[in-house]
Amino acid sequence: MRPEREPRTGEGSRPSPAVRDRDDDLSVLFGTSTALFASMAGPAHVLEAANPAFFTAIGGGQRARTGVPLGDLMPELESQGFLRLLDQVYRTGERHVGRDTRVVIGVGRHAREAYVDFTYEARRDTGGNVVGVRMIGVETTQAKHARRLAAEQRALLEQIARQAPLPEVLEGMCRVIEELSPDVIVSVLLADEEGRRLHHGAAPSLPAFYIQAIDGIATGEGVGSCGTAAHRRSKVIVTDIATDPLWDDFRELAGRAGLAACWSTPILGRDGRVLGTFAMYHRTPRAPLDTDLALASLFVDTAALAVERHQAELARRTADAREKAARDDLSYLLTASTALAGPLDEGQTLRRLAELAVPALAPLAAVDVVEAGRVHRVASAATTGRARELLASHSGVRETEGDAVARVLATGLTEVARRTPAGPGPWEELGVTGYLCVPLMDRERPFGVLSLYATDDTALDGHRIALAEEAARRAASAAHNARQYAQRAALVRDLQTGLLLPDLPDVPGAQVAAFYHPAGQGLDIGGDFYDVFPRGDGSWSFVLGDVCGRGAKAATTTALVRHTARAVAPLLDDPVAVVEAVDRALNDRTSQQNNGFVTLVHGHLTPVEDGLSVELVRAGHTLPLLLDAGHTVTPVEAHGGLIGIGIPPRLDAVRFTLRPTESLVLYTDGITECRAAGTEQYGDARLLKALASNPGPPDRDGHRAEADGGHPGVHERADGRRRPGGAGGDGGGAVAARAVRPGRFPGHAVSRVGSPHAGAGAARPRRG
C-alpha cells in the first residue's frame, strides 16, 4: 500500500490540551461504531485512548487498558513491522494508509488472523509539533472471508455444474471450511438409498482408522452426533464428547482420534429425504460460534445440491444403461427371430439357436432333443473350434435322474446352477463353472433343452436367463412351425401325386410327355391338372386344364373334372359333348363345394396312316401350340368360353392331323406368368421363341444333345433367362404329343403336351 504523506512541522513528547480534547471527541465518536480508534503519545507510543471496538479487536481482557506502550500491550506487532511504521509516522509526520492489511493478533493458541484498513497520522500540538500518532481503521476480516467464501462457493458450484466427481466436490468443500476455520475438522457422511445407514463421503483431516470405523453406521438415536442428526432430521450439537451420552458407543474411538466436540447437521434433499450429514469436529470441548453455524448452514445447502446432482446423474446413467441394454436385448431378439424364421427345417433351426447363443448369452451352448424316446444332441456352439468339438463329442443321451437335461425334460422348468454339471463330461477341460438349462416347449410339453455353460469370466445372471428363455421360446415356435411345414408339405405332395397320373401311358403311334412343377413352397395343392387315357376304341383322350384357386377345394374340383372326363369320354365321340358334360358336373356342385371356374383343353388322338388325327376343344384355356418340322410355332385357333360358371359355354371343335416330326403343345399360364425375382414375366413371346429353338425330340431316356444341356425356356440358359416355374404364378406345366419312332417322351415344360407348375405335355405322331 502506498502511504499518503503530509509535511512534518515539528515534534513533541506530550500532547497539548487542545490535542487531548480532539482525541476525546474522536473516542466518543468511534466508541459507538465498529470502526477502530486508538491514540498514542510520544516515541514510546503509549496508548492514551481507544474505543471498545479496538480493545475487542486486539483480544480484550488484560489488553483492554491504557497508559501502556502499544509494544508492551501487543508484542506481536514488532515482528510484523507495525511498530516501525508508527516510528516512521512519528518521526516524519507523514501519514500512512494501509488497505486490507493482514495482521496476526495474539500469540500462541489464542492468536488469530485479521485484516484491517487503517490510517496512521501524526498528532500535533498547537505549534505544529508531532506529539503522537493516531490510528483510525476498520477490520475487514469478515468481509475478506465473505469474499473468499463466495469465491470458494462459486468454485464448488462450478464443479457441481460440470459434473465433477462427488468425492472431489465434497473433499474440496471440507478443505475450504477447514481453511476458513483453522480449528475445525470437517466430515461428510452420505446416506444409503433407504436412509438407514451413513457411509464415508469426505473427511480429509480425520484419521483413516476413524473413517473406517464410522463408515456404514446406522441412523438412530444415540448413534453419535451424525447418526442422531440423521435420525432426528435436525442439528445436533455435542460440546463435550467425553460426557455426552450420545457418544457412549464411540467415546473411546473419538478419544483415540483426538476429537472433543462435534456439531452435526443433516443434509436434506428438496423432497425432504436425508441425503447425509455434515459434521464439524473440535479438538477441545467448546460450543459453536455463530460463524461456525453460519458456515455449516451455508455448506450444507451446497452439499445437498452436489449430492442431488450426483444422484440425478447416477439415475440418468442407470436409465441410459437400462435403455441401451433394452435396445441390445431387442436387437438380439429381432436378430434371433429373423434368423430362426428363415429356415423351414427343424434341425437347421435348432443349430441356429445354439449359434445365436454364443457368445451373446454364454461361451458354450448345446441343444438336445427327444427322438424316438431317447435324448440326442443335435447342435453345439462355442467360441473356439476345439471347445465346440469337445461339447459336440459329449453324449447327449440322458438317462440318470441327476442329469439337469433329464430333469428339465421331465419338469419343463428352467434350471440354473453356479457349479459344474453333474455326471461325466469335458467340464474341467472346458472350464465350466455354471450351467443354465432352458426347456424347448411344444404345446406345453418339452421336446428339447437349450443348455448354456458359463466359464470363469462369465456369469449366468437373471438378465441372461430371461434372454435365453425368450430365445428358446422363439426357437421352439420356429421348430414347431418347421415341423408342421414338413408334415404339411409331405401331405400336399402325397395328395398332389394322387391327383396326377403316376406315369403317362404308351399311346400307339405317338410320343407323349408331361412336365409338372408346383409353384411356391409346395404347401398348397395346385389347381393345374392333366390326364391321358384310352377311350376303348383305339383312340385316346387327353385333357389339360386349370382350376381357379388352390388347396383342398381346387383338388376336389380337379378330381371332379378328371373323373367326369374319364367317365364320359368313352361314351361320347364328340369332344364338345365331353366338355359340356364336365360343365354340367361343375355347375351341379353345391355352394360349399363350388371353387369357381375351370379352363381346359380336351381332345381325342386317333392314329392314322399319315400321323395322328387330333380333334380338340378349348374352354377358356391358353391356345394350344403346333410346332412343325421347320420349327415354326403356330397357335391352334379354337374358340370356347369358361366352364363351371353357370352359363353354358359356346364350344367349337378343331380337327387336324399331326404329322410325323410335328408336335402339339398344351400348357397352363403358370409357364408364361412365372418370373425370376425382380424380373418381368416369362411371357408368350419367350415361350414361342423357346419352342422354335427346340433342336429335336429327346431319346427314350429324355436325353438331348444340346449345348445348353436342356430344353430352351425350362432350364437356366447361358443368356441368363430363368426357367418357368420361378417366383410368381400358380405353378404350371405342359403336355406334348409328337408322332415319332416308338418310345415314351418324358420331356419338359414347353416341348410336348403338358404343364409346369401344374402339368404340361405334347403329343407327336410315331413314324410308321
Image (cartoon, rainbow, N blue to C red):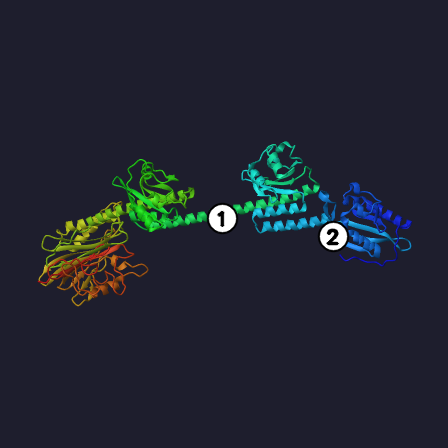
Q: Is residue 66 left or right of residue 305?
A: right
| CA distance for labels 1 and 2 | 52 Å
At a point 80% along the width and 57% down the height, the residue shown is 4
Amino acid type of the residue tagged 1 in the rendering: Asp
- Horizontal and vertical percent position of residue 757: 24, 55
Q: Is residue 61 left or right of residue 548?
A: right
- Horizontal and vertical percent position of residue 200: 57, 41
Q: Secondary structure at mark 2?
A: strand
Q: Which mark is residue 670?
A: none
> Is residue 8 something that shows in the picture?
yes
Q: Quadrant of residue 241?
A: top right
- Vertical position of residue 390 compared to residue 763: above or below: above
At a point 78% along the width and 40% down the height, the residue shown is 61
Q: Which residue is mark 2?
A: 100
Q: Which residue is mark 1?
A: 320
Q: Nearer the viewer, residue 722 or 21?
A: 21
Q: Quadrant of residue 247?
A: top right
User: What crowding class fits label 2: few (fewer than 14 Cα within 10 Å), some (14-19), or many (20 or more)?
Assistant: some
> Is residue 190 something that shows in the picture?
no
- Horizontal and vertical percent position of residue 306: 59, 46
